[in-house]
Image: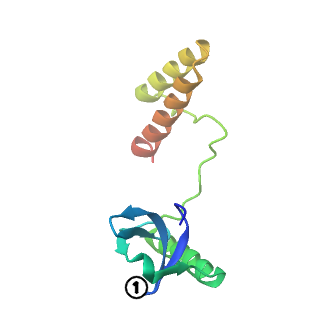
Amino acid sequence: MELGAWVYDQVAGVVGEFKGAAGPYVMLRPVGGGREWQADPGDLRPATPAERLSAGVRAANERARAGAAQPVPDLSRPPEPVPHCVACALLVRERREAQGRFDHSAVTDMNVLLRRHLWQDHP
């Protein structure tokens, strides 16, 4: 069984994502995330296309109900700082210095930190 494969747990009656082995059992996670559970490998079978579709739709509906269905940010462009924010300005300065050193890893790190700052402090 491959990591990430969707299987049907015949005992629990649900589709889960295969996460790995744990002794004589396997670990499964609900489609869309959630608490893992153990299952006996003999009780599993590959999920049918209909079961996969149903599990995916269920996960999307749960995300929408929970309010997590937010637009995905455009990650192809660097984040824009908020004017007059000292923390934003410092992160942009660090990013600019990393660009000058051609340190693309540090540039990516600064973009991640700036996005996190924007998400936490400038909702």
Choose between 48 and 85: the one closer to the eye. Answer: 48
Locate residue 24: give its quadrant. bottom left
Residue 65 x, y percent position in the rendering: 47, 74
Instruction: Tell me which amino acid carries mark 1.
Output: Ala
The correct choice, above or below, for 58 with respect to 85 in the image is below
Q: Indicate whether 55 appears above or below 22.
A: below
Query: Relative to the observer, which residue lies in front, 21 or 31?
Result: 21
Residue 119 drawn at (x, y percent): 45, 45
**Image coordinates for residue 88, horizontal then vertical, percent:** 46, 29
The residue that mark 1 highlights is: 12
Residue in front for this viewpoint, 53 or 11:
11
Q: Looking at the image, how many numbered discs can be counted on the residues?
A: 1
Locate residue 101: give its quadrant. top right
Tell me: residue 52, above or below residue 86. Answer: below
Looking at the image, which residue is at 32% across and 65% down? 23
> At x 42% / y 69%, what residue is drawn?
28
Colour pattern of the rendering: rainbow
Q: Residue at x 60, y 77 (%)?
A: 52
